[in-house]
Amino acid sequence: MAIMFDQFRIVTDPVGDSVAVSAVFAVLPLLTLFVLLGVVRMRAWLAGVISLLVALVVAVAVYAMPVGQAVLSATEGAAFGFFPILWIVINAIWVYNLTVVSGHFDVLRRSMERVSPDMRIQAVIVAFCFGALLEALAGFGTPVAVTVVMLMALGFRPIQAAAVALIANTAPVAFGALATPITTLGTVTSGAADDPRLNPDTLGAMVGRQTPVLAVVVPLVLVAVIDGKRGVKQTWPVALVAGVVFAGAQFVASNYISVPLTDIIAALLAAAAVMLLLRRWRPVESPNLSTGERPAPASGSAVAVAEKRDTRAEVARAYAPYLVIIVIFSIANLGPIKAALAEAPWTVSFGWPGLDVLGANGKPLASTTFTLGWLPAAGTLMILAGLITAVLLRVGAREALRAYGRTYVELRHAIVTVMAVLALAYVLNQSGQTNTLGEFLAQAGGFFVFLSSILGWIGVAVTGSDTSANALFGALQVQTAADAGLDPVLLAAANSSGGVLGKMISPQNLAIAASAVGMAGKEGDIFRRVVGWSVALLLVMCVLVTLQGTPVLDWMVPATP
């Protein structure tokens, strides 16, 4: 028994003292996951569990990790998957379900339809602008879970709604959940190199000089996904305005105003710009959405809007939950309040019981410490928002409790998927498999500047979280930069910026989208619909980062003070 729980120290070249040969084994869990999802079309939760088992076998048989330590690593990852990630997704969807129960979601939908009956423009407003606002406040899958259902209510086909929601959830991700990924990146990289720029403000500024390029392109991609070349030709003004305003605001806010508030500012300004444009401009032609070539409008669309006019009070109530969320999250993130909530008893940190893992440098891994911020957690704040929402929307306590129970039932497959994949990520990280893959990629030397975004992409694809990917690879990016003579701020930021493009193909995001549109078990179909866009946009980011590492665009990298 003692052997099962003996202390474990990470070794990155366990097979023949070769990182390259060891990488062949380290990549097996990831290959298993992607093959089962994309080729076999297996249910995401089952693919996640099987890939976790493969990771455990590799950890024990190849990396000589004690069985007990491997299992404990998986349990910590599963716990992290539930809290804080699922905790916020579940409670955010509960708030949404309260709006459905009260009938105010239909009011919100009709309000957005009145802005424009054109579904291509609705996609830009709902998936891109509103989704970015949700990402700014909550992150961790919430935007996909909410906007995909809103798109279906507006008349989108299930698989199309899922694809649009997933693709839209890219540009804002790095600054999601009030810039949690950037904060994490600053934390894990600050001690990895002696560079005063490795802090959240400077890293956020650098990311703000990369992701805006995606923001300009994404709305155009959305209308192309919905209506092909015709969609781009007829609605490019609104897509371009949304993208350019969001990109400009994201750059300015991240560099000169506030990194945590970046996406909130960008989302609100982009939405306002679209609204102003639509007062003076409409598409020349709106496609016949009732034909088989385009998704049919929902029962509450176009004609129904003309039949039912909601009062201003009802419309205000429909938007109230989101205003409540903004206020609560803004208050909770005020400096003194945030600092107070980060202390005991509101936040408690402890070593995961029995887990004893040392890094390759012989120091205990920071990831073995579990932080339970039960009160300041975004999910807990969402519960508070839900309680206030129930009062505002006049939902009774019994009905609100029923809705909460239904939310867990609806997300049961997504819950298993997220917990399994985060368990997989922790085993990969704490057994040394992640380090092996990173060191293998780092052997590319100067060419690593092109590969750095891909590493972040892999991290998010596996964990579903830019925060987790930054925690996994942030320090590695900085260490590699030092070894290869590259800029550590550039590569650290590239990890986050490249990572956002892995969001649309991550198993848990796919599971959330599939569950929300009634396609549970068909995550592979959605995966194939979006993977091409994920790879194409990733290549754009790789080229941008590479140019920023050369005299062509190196002026975009913040200088050492």
Image (cartoon, helix red, strand yellow):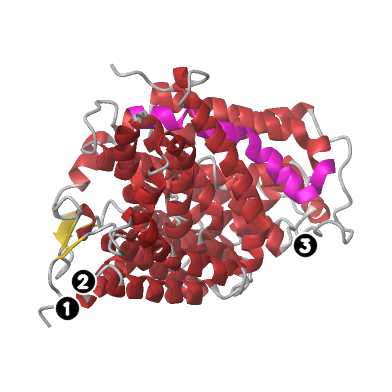
Q: Where is residue 164 in the image (x, y as percent from the top left)?
A: 66, 52
Name the quarter where the C terminus is drawn: top left
Residue at 38%, 76% in the rendered image: 53
Q: Can you identify the residue that label 3 sits on?
A: 299
Q: In which quarter of the image is residue 91?
A: bottom left
Q: Can you identify the residue that label 2 sits on?
A: 69
Name the quarter where the N terminus is drawn: bottom left
Q: Which of 435 and 278 is in front in this view?
A: 435
Residue at 21%, 71% in the rendered image: 69
Residue at 76%, 60% in the rendered image: 298
Please, what is the three-letter code of the amino acid marked with disc 1? Answer: Met
| Dot 3 or dot 2, earlier in sequence | 2
Q: Is mark 2 on a helix, strand or loop?
A: helix
Res. 184 in view: no
Q: Can you identify the residue that label 1 sits on?
A: 4
Q: Give the range drawn in magenta.
A: 202-230
Q: Is residue 126 left or right of residue 327?
A: right
